[in-house]
Amino acid sequence: MNFIFLLTGLLFIFVIGFLVSNDRKNIKYKRILTMLVVQVILVYFMMNTNIGLIAITKVGVFFEELMKLADAGINFVFGGMVNEGAFTFFMSVLLPLVFISVLIGILNYIKVLPFIIKYLGLILSKITGMGKLESYFAISTATLGQPEVFLTIIKQIPVLSPQRLYTICTSAMSAISMAMVGSYMKMLEPKFVVTAVVLNIFSALIIANIINPYDLDEKEDLVQVEEKEKLPFFQMIGESVMDGFKLVIIVAAMLLGFISLMELINVVFLGVFQISFQTVIGYIFAPIAFLMGIPWGEAVQAGGIMATKLITNEFVAMLNFGDISKQLSDKTVAIVSVYLVSFANFGTVGIVAGSIKAISEKQGNFVAKHSMKLLLGATLASVISGTMMGLVM
């Protein structure tokens, strides 16, 4: 039965992608099939083998330990402000991002991350048949996040073709940054977060080969990575701290606004229509959830969470999901958890367009003009990853 729902989910994605494709005659079926097979192998390995489960568990434990280390600084600065045993989202989930940001800065400084990104990108390019730039970017965006990741290819963005620009923007919206992994693990099971990170890299490239297929001349396929002037070590630490804290404040502010807005909309809908807004959007997304493998009896609740992520952001959706996940089956929890682990939402479109426009006004205008197709592609990538998870549950 799981295999049937894998087919229904992938068929839905292909039909939607085909309808909006820029070049239906040149859809790269071989590349798509190769990446789908790789995803099936990876999800089985990670979820159904002892080695895979141990590896995922170790990664989860590693990030849990990092979050505990972050608590040392948080408790020193904010100790006594939170009741013992209480859970405060800002303290427990957001503030550890500052410490993770510092670690990423150090790994960049000592050239460990650039080395890993470069060679994983080359391997990915061989597997997927995609360009070296696209593969490099797919790995780096899953590590560095945005908007920082665009700065690594700042010289190439102004001269990229529309097709290649669409691919890298879809990757940016479909992935999550390493800094966010620990925070997500506070709200979702770590094994689902790790699996989603891996699956999303391929899902974004699959969608690009349906909606936006193209071939590359070998001369075009060069990766020129921009390297910043090397700062003194402690200056780099200071800047990493401030970058992490800015991220914390931005996320906190967005949550304040979005959650309050959602509550207002719910109150209006309950008062006027006697039904919550999330239930309404849940009915809209329910058929999609069902095609992904979620039981029909849980499809409306799952669909509401999926739609919430699209309309607001993944943090709002994860918080809402935590409230209802105990009422849902293990399969639904797994599929929705993997679906939620990406930046595919309306707010991220603005971040991506703004980041590109700061580098090249012409390219930024292209991204803004095609923002809805970009958001559709990134959302379909999340659907692919969620559907893949349903295969092994």
Image (cartoon, grey):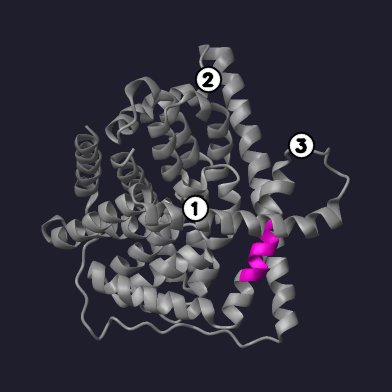
Gap between marks 3 and 1, in whole Å? 26 Å
Q: Is residue 133 above or below residue 192?
A: below
> Helix or strand or loop: what does disc 2 sit on?
loop
Position of residue 164 relative to residue 327, above or below, is below
Give the farthest residue toward the left: 25
Residue placed at 68% from the left, 51% from the top?
94
Does 371 appear in magenta? no
Q: Residues within 10 Å of mark 1 (few under 14, many from 20)?
A: some
**Mark 3 → mark 2, Cα distance in angstroms:** 29 Å
Q: Can you identify the residue that label 1 sits on? A: 57
Amino acid carrying label 3: it is Ala
Q: Amino acid at mark 2?
A: Ser
Badge 3 is on which residue?
86
Image: magenta residue range: 96-103
Question: Residue 245: horizontal and vertical position, in percent?
Answer: 71, 60
Q: Is residue 161 visible?
A: no
